[in-house]
Image (cartoon, rainbow, N blue to C red):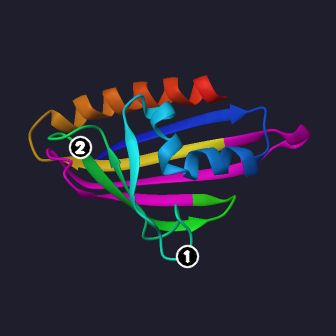
Amino acid sequence: MQTIEIVQEFSRPVAEVYEELADHNRLGKVLGVPVVRVRDGNSSVNGVGSVRRIGVAPLAIEETVVGAVAGKSIDYKITRGGWPLKNHHGRLVFKPLTGGRSQLTWHIEFNGALPGSAFLVKQILNLAISRGLKKIA
């Protein structure tokens, strides 16, 4: 099992940061690859049940939001594509700080289907997400 945990502070309140990172169509700015919402959620467009496509065919993956509490957390998992990854689950936790600031903890866990593949993906994801979050911080 590989684990990534990125902590980033923002000079904006939780509500603004949550709104930006919950919006599938704006997430590409963070990840550095195309991200498009392909299915609306059950009760809100980016909420539980919503699906986003990340990347370009034939390497694109789809992630489904499996849990969301506005202003608090977002849980998602890969539901299509993603080989050579297995059991990929991500969780974003938002925390208010003093002075209108906020903190995000982005936690990801996954296994690799091939020896060494998970370690390589871990390095790429960690770098891409860290850079993207610093850009919007």
Task: Return the residue nearer the eye: 115 or 36.
Answer: 36
Residue assigned mark 2: 60
In the displayed structure, does residue 5 sit left or right of residue 115?
Answer: right
- Residue 96 included in the magenta stretch of the image: yes
Secondary element at tag 2:
loop
Could you tell me residue 24's position as x and y percent?
A: 48, 50
- The residue at 55%/50% (across/down) is 23
Check disc 1 and give the amino acid type: Ser
The quadrant in which residue 128 appears is: top left
The quadrant in which residue 49 appears is: bottom left
- The residue at 73%/46% (across/down) is 16
- The residue at 63%/29% (across/down) is 136
Circle 1/circle 2 CB separation < 8 Å:
no
In the displayed structure, does residue 18 sit left or right of residue 114?
Answer: right
> In the orientation shown, which residue stands out farthest toward the right?
99
Could you tell me residue 35's position as x and y percent?
A: 39, 42
Task: Return the residue nearer the eye: 115 or 92.
Answer: 92
Q: Estimate the spatial distance between the alpha carbons at disc 1 and disc 2, rounded to whole Å.
A: 25 Å
Check disc 2 and give the amino acid type: Ala
- The residue at 45%/66% (across/down) is 40
In the displayed structure, does residue 93 sit left or right of residue 118?
Answer: right
Disc 2 packing (10 Å; few <14; some 14–19; many ≥20): some
- Residue 86 included in the magenta stretch of the image: yes
Q: Is residue 68 above or below residue 125?
A: below
Identify the mark nearer the N-term, 1 or 2.
1
Task: Return the residue nearer the eye: 73 or 64.
Answer: 64
Q: Main secondary structure of the magenta part?
A: strand
The tag on residue 43 is 1
Could you tell me residue 129's position as x and y percent?
A: 46, 32
